[in-house]
Amino acid sequence: MADVSSTIRAEVRSLAPYNAGLTLEEVRTRYQVDRIAKLGSNENPLGPSPRLRKLFADIGDLARLYPDPQGRALCAEIAGHFGVGTGQVILGNGSEDLIAVVCRSVVRPGDTVATLYPSFPLHEDYATLMGGIVERVTVRDDLEINLDALVAAARRKPRILMFSNPMNPVGSWLSPAGLKTVIEALDDETLLVVDEAYAEYAAGEDYPSAVDLLGETGANWVVLRTFSKAYGLAGLRIGYGIASGADLCSFFDRARTPFNTNAIAQASAIVALADEGHLRLSVEHAIGERERVRETLESSGYRVAPSKCNFLFFDARGNSTAVAEELLKRGVIVKPWKQPGFDAFIRASIGSAEENDHFLAALEAIRAGR
Ligand SMILES: *Cc1c(COP(=O)(O)O)cnc(C)c1O
């Protein structure tokens, strides 16, 4: 029989499988635990706006009919929210879908795609898939973003400069002045992609909305956002991009599947976006619990990265995969980081107070050899 791998493009063969983590069901059956703290995927422990429960009493036509391929009603709400034109908004089946669409539209074989490191793996994978060469800008020893190195990378005129801010997996962020410096260093030919999956948690004086800063700069840019994190809709798969111009969006439209977002997700996102009270509750909960978890970790001697996100990245001092395995046996799911140089680190999401206590107690038990 023919070797199937020769059928597959070298770029695809070179990718590591996405490490999506275990589901509740997998952990239950594999580890025989019934109480589980699911802290591996940065989901919102409060769930979506309670208003969603009333939405689908009559699901008939929502399920029967094809969705609006542009998701115009949702795009209009998002455009209003940010004060941009409706044509500047594009929807994705999760923002990860848009990372793929952008790379598919822009990256030619041999192009450089520069990103922060440790990285959100999909920023690297979709670039690699298109034949791009990934250039990594590693965080400083104190786990803050290395602004000088990022500016230097921008000056080398990559095809795309793409990073998350605040950054996953570390949690650190660029201040408004820092982001401005990066924007000023951009070449006209470079597309800037700022992935703001955690912006709702970070919002405030020290954190720039890239949409505001980029607005009239003349640069080509895309800001990615998602309903998966602070809005609690990870299971529905809906995210969006705001681009510098409608022309850019219409090119991206050609590189996506026509019905990439479904009707239920579009309708849910409209309701979620409008419920500002629920968003505030979710963010306040995450920040309050994050600082409580941080204090406990630090008082046990762990080094914890700065974070404006709903997770903490900390040095587990040793083999993080082995620690994560011990945590799984105690019903706690976290994400052990596996990229070279950072494989002693664990990323733990901020869950409910009960989940966080469960995590902290399990970690302490492992540390004490119990
Ligand atoms: C979670 C996350 C995403 C993916 O979000 P989806 O909208 O669920 O696809 C994108 N970028 C970063 C940095 C993330 O952490």
Image (spheres, rainbow, N blue to C red):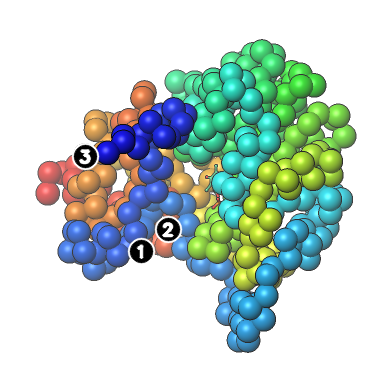
| Discs 3/2, front | 3
Residue 165 % position (x, y): 61, 37
Classify mark 2: helix, strand or loop. Answer: loop
User: Would you say 143 lies left or right of 67 here?
Assistant: left
- Report, in whole angstroms, how far the alpha carbon at label 1 lies from the one at label 3: 24 Å
Q: Is 342 drawn above or below residue 203 in the view shown?
A: above
Q: Is 40 drawn above or below residue 280 in the view shown?
A: above
Amino acid type, mark 1: Glu
- The residue lying at 49 percent from left, 27 percent from top is 117
Residue 166 % position (x, y): 58, 38
Asked if the residue under mark 2 is in contact with the one under mark 1, i.e. CB atoms within 8 Å, the reply is yes
- The residue lying at 38 percent from left, 31 percent from top is 6
Q: Which residue does the numbered mark 3 point to in the structure image?
A: 322
| Discs 1/3, front | 3
Q: Earlier in the sequence, mark 3 or mark 2?
A: 3
Pick the front one: 59 or 25? 59
- Report, in whole angstroms, how far the alpha carbon at label 1 lies from the one at label 2: 8 Å
Answer yes or no: disc 1 within 8 Å of ligand 1.
no
Q: Is 173 drawn above or below residue 51 in the view shown?
A: above
Quadrant in which residue 8 is drawn: top left
Q: Is residue 209 visible?
A: no
Number of other residues with Cα within 10 Å of mark 3, as a class: few under 14, some 14 to 19, many 20 or more: few
Amino acid type, mark 2: Gly
Classify mark 1: helix, strand or loop. Answer: helix
Q: Earlier in the sequence, mark 1 or mark 3?
A: 3
Q: Which residue does the numbered mark 2 point to in the structure image?
A: 351
